[in-house]
Image (spheres, rainbow, N blue to C red):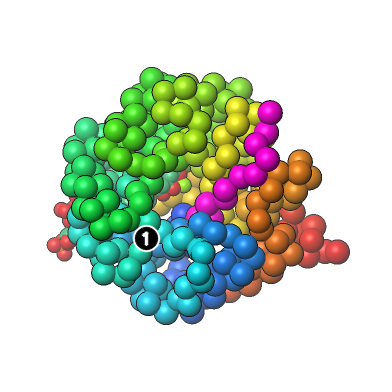
Amino acid sequence: ASPAAVRIVEVGPRDGLQNEPGTVPLLAKVALIEALAEAGLKDIEAGSFVSPKWVPQMADTIEVLAALKRRPGVRYSVLTPNLKGLEQALAAGIEEVAVFAAASEAFSQKNINCTIAESLERFVPVLDIARANGVAVRGYVSCVLGCPYQGEVPVAKVVEVSQALVAMGCYEVSLGDTIGVGTPGKAKAMAKAVADQIGLQRTALHFHDTYGQALANVLACLDLGIASLDSAVAGLGGCPYAKGASGNLATEDLVYMLDGLGVATGVDLDRLAAAGRAITGALGRPSASKAARALAAK
Ligand code: HMG
Ligand code: MG
């Protein structure tokens, strides 16, 4: 049965904007994050401390965090692939960071320039220092339902990498269908295999909507009792190292469905849709969220 309430981790300012072809103005990023917090989102991924040569769109994360009016009760997080990133996060007064591994060797090389095993080794000191400073660490596993370079990804590998992330101290592992190829049966089986090993309360889901399956995948997995879901306002996004991957599951579509199911999210759909209109206006293109388009037409 579905949980009574879920936590939504809003990844639009990070996963959404990291793939933009043009430069997104600093003030548009700040306004987006503030509007998302006003809409009731309590967990917002605000940027990345990664190499600006690899992901130029996130190069101003330090300025975004400095300009942001932080709202009490909201947890702002950033991606930190190594100690250099963590140092920046600590200096910015961030309470939560995320490390990101992959279940596919080929993707790990393209995304973070090392093997899966090397990435896990590199994360250990990141976790140790983060936790010594009272910073929570989330773990990501990419390519859990397929890889743009290697194709099929064994569920056993997803389980193994998830277990390693929990063993080093990640409070939760977000399972990323990076290229949005998953379908509900496979998504549910994969999520169950992971949750059986690391626990339901440590399992989160991160779907991309490339093939229009994201919401169906969420619904199938909700049935397992998973209660932590990633999405991006206006369906922003894609990954710079996953060609052809379209946006994340749209937060508006997710909230609309959960409202209908009577699953509490704490998010105000109208305010959320307004946040989406503002950022898609700034980017100069229509929203990828069907719910947002329907609400705008009302
Ligand atoms: P590398 O080239 O192997 O690392 O990159 P390096 O240690 O040799 O450093 C190279 C240069 O980067 C050096 O600068 C470092 O100082 C700098 P130089 O001396 O050449 O001027 N550098 C940094 N600068 C700022 N912040 C840092 C940092 N680290 C090194 N933290 C590295 C390895 C991991 C750094 C690189 O590959 C990288 O930054 N990758 C990031 C890729 C990324 O952000 N991808 C998108 C996020 S993952 C995703 O979207 C999937 C997810 O959404 C889930 C899903 O959908 O599946 C999470
Ligand atoms: Mg993603």
Comparing 203 with 112, the one in front is: 203
Residue under label 1: 95
Comparing 243 with 135, the one in front is: 135
Question: Does the image show residue 172?
Answer: yes
Q: Residue at x 34, y 29 (%)?
A: 163
From this view, report whether residue 42 is shown above or below residue 161: below
Report x, y in % for residue 224. 60, 27
Report x, y in % for residue 245. 50, 44
- Position of residue 276 in the picture relative to residue 230 (left or right): right
Comparing 88 with 133, the one in front is: 133
- Position of residue 151 in the picture relative to residue 41 (left or right): left
Question: Does the image show residue 247?
Answer: no
Residue type (three-letter) at the residue carrying disc 1: Glu
Q: Residue at x 34, y 49 (%)?
A: 137
Instruction: Give neighbour class at mark 1: few <14, some 14-19, many 20+ (Cα, 10 Å).
Output: some
From this view, report whether residue 243 is shown above or below residue 251: above
Comparing 261 with 285, the one in front is: 261
Q: Which residues are magenta?
A: 1-12
- Classify mark 1: helix, strand or loop: loop
Q: Residue at x 30, y 56 (%)?
A: 134
Q: Residue at x 41, y 39 (%)?
A: 173
Residue 3 belongs to magenta span = yes
Name the quarter where the N terminus is drawn.
top right
